[in-house]
């Protein structure tokens, strides 16, 4: 039976939403978005999510939320790119009260990775795959034989004397007005660290910047096979919707 569920992807700059056919992994229509509120407190962010849900009434039932945090049993454990008032909050309960619907929270990079491994660039990868999302920070999702090791926070490894995401994220590229050669030099340093620590067979590069993969692909250097994310900036929305199936009766 066809199920169209709502996926929400909370980013440091924007909150995206889309209706996903969870049987095929396809977003039905366009994704919509709204600015992430400042400050991004639980109450204000829940209001933004509710506003997006109202604009997509065709999606009924449970809702999945991809969130930029370590999420354990629905509880928010870190807040690198979100307001610190989220720490210790039950994300599903906070948003569920506003939507009056079942809600599932998971790490945003994990959500993107789930979508790519099921329907996208990671399909048929039988060894070790690493999903990297470049945006406000660097999100990571590690898969071994198709199974997710949840809540890896490899964007916070030390690189060049700082958090890796403070050195090589897409936001850093924008803030420092780096051209692709200058930015990819930093990305290659990060990829070398990932290769040295995890020896993945495949690395999937995601985030909105992956839509421009052809412009910088020849500059990338890594021993692992590199692939652009199939779903680019929609992967988090798709993976969140797929995760929301867990709360279906």
Image (spheres, rainbow, N blue to C red):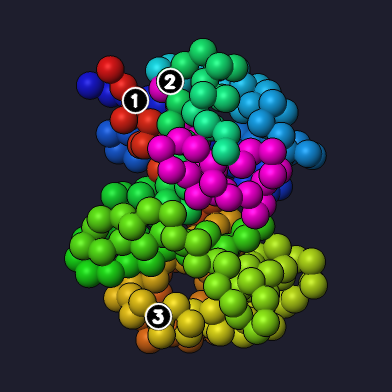
Callout 3: SS: helix
First in sequence: mark 2 vs mark 1: 2
The stretch in magenta equals 62-87
Is 71 colored magenta in this rendering? yes
Instruction: Estimate the spatial distance between the alpha carbons at disc 2 and disc 1, rounded to whole Å.
Output: 6 Å
Q: Which residue is mark 1?
A: 247
Return the x and y of residue 50 as percentages of the image width and height: 62, 21
Q: Callout 2: few (<14), some (14-19), or many (20+) C-alpha neighbours within 10 Å?
A: many
Q: Residues at badges 2 and 1 in contact (C-beta under 8 Å)? A: yes
First in sequence: mark 2 vs mark 3: 2
Q: Callout 3: few (<14), some (14-19), or many (20+) C-alpha neighbours within 10 Å?
A: few
Q: Quadrant of residue 63?
A: top left
**Number of numbered discs on residues:** 3
Q: Which residue is mark 3?
A: 197
- Say which residue appears at 56% left-offset and 24% top-offset: 95
Return the x and y of residue 21 as percentages of the image width and height: 36, 31
Query: 211 and 63: which one is in front?
Result: 63
Q: Which residue is mark 2?
A: 102
Callout 1: SS: helix
| Badge number at residue 139 | none
Instruction: Estimate the spatial distance between the alpha carbons at disc 3 and disc 1, rounded to whole Å.
Output: 35 Å
Callout 2: SS: loop
- Say which residue appears at 63% left-offset and 49% top-offset: 79
Q: Is residue 11 visible?
A: yes
Return the x and y of residue 40 as percentages of the image width and height: 72, 38
Q: Callout 1: few (<14), some (14-19), or many (20+) C-alpha neighbours within 10 Å?
A: some
Instruction: Estimate the spatial distance between the alpha carbons at disc 2 and disc 3, rounded to whole Å.
Output: 38 Å
């Amino acid at each position: 039976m066809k199920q169209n569920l709502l996926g929400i992807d909370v980013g440091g700059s924007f909150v995206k939403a889309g209706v996903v056919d969870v049987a095929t992994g396809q977003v039905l229509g366009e994704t919509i978005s709204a600015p992430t509120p400042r400050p991004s407190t639980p109450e204000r962010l829940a209001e933004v999510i509710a506003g997006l849900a109202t604009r997509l009434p065709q999606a009924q039932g449970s809702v999945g939320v991809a969130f930029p945090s370590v999420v354990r049993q629905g509880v928010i454990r870190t807040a690198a790119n979100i307001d610190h008032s989220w720490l210790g909050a039950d994300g599903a309960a906070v948003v569920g009260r506003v939507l009056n619907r079942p809600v599932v929270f998971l790490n945003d990079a994990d959500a993107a990775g789930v979508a790519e491994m099921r329907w996208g660039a990671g399909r048929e990868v039988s060894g070790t795959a690493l999903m990297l999302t470049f945006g406000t920070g660097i999100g990571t999702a590690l898969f071994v034989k198709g199974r997710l090791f949840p809540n890896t926070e490899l964007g916070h490894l030390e690189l060049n004397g700082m958090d890796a995401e403070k050195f090589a994220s897409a936001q850093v590229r924008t803030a420092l007005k780096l051209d692709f050669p200058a930015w990819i030099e930093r990305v290659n340093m990060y990829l070398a660290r990932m290769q040295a620590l995890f020896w993945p067979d495949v690395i999937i590069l995601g985030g909105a910047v992956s839509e421009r993969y052809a412009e910088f692909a020849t500059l990338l250097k890594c021993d692992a096979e590199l692939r652009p994310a199939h779903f680019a900036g929609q992967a988090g929305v798709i993976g969140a919707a797929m995760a929301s199936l867990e709360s279906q009766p």
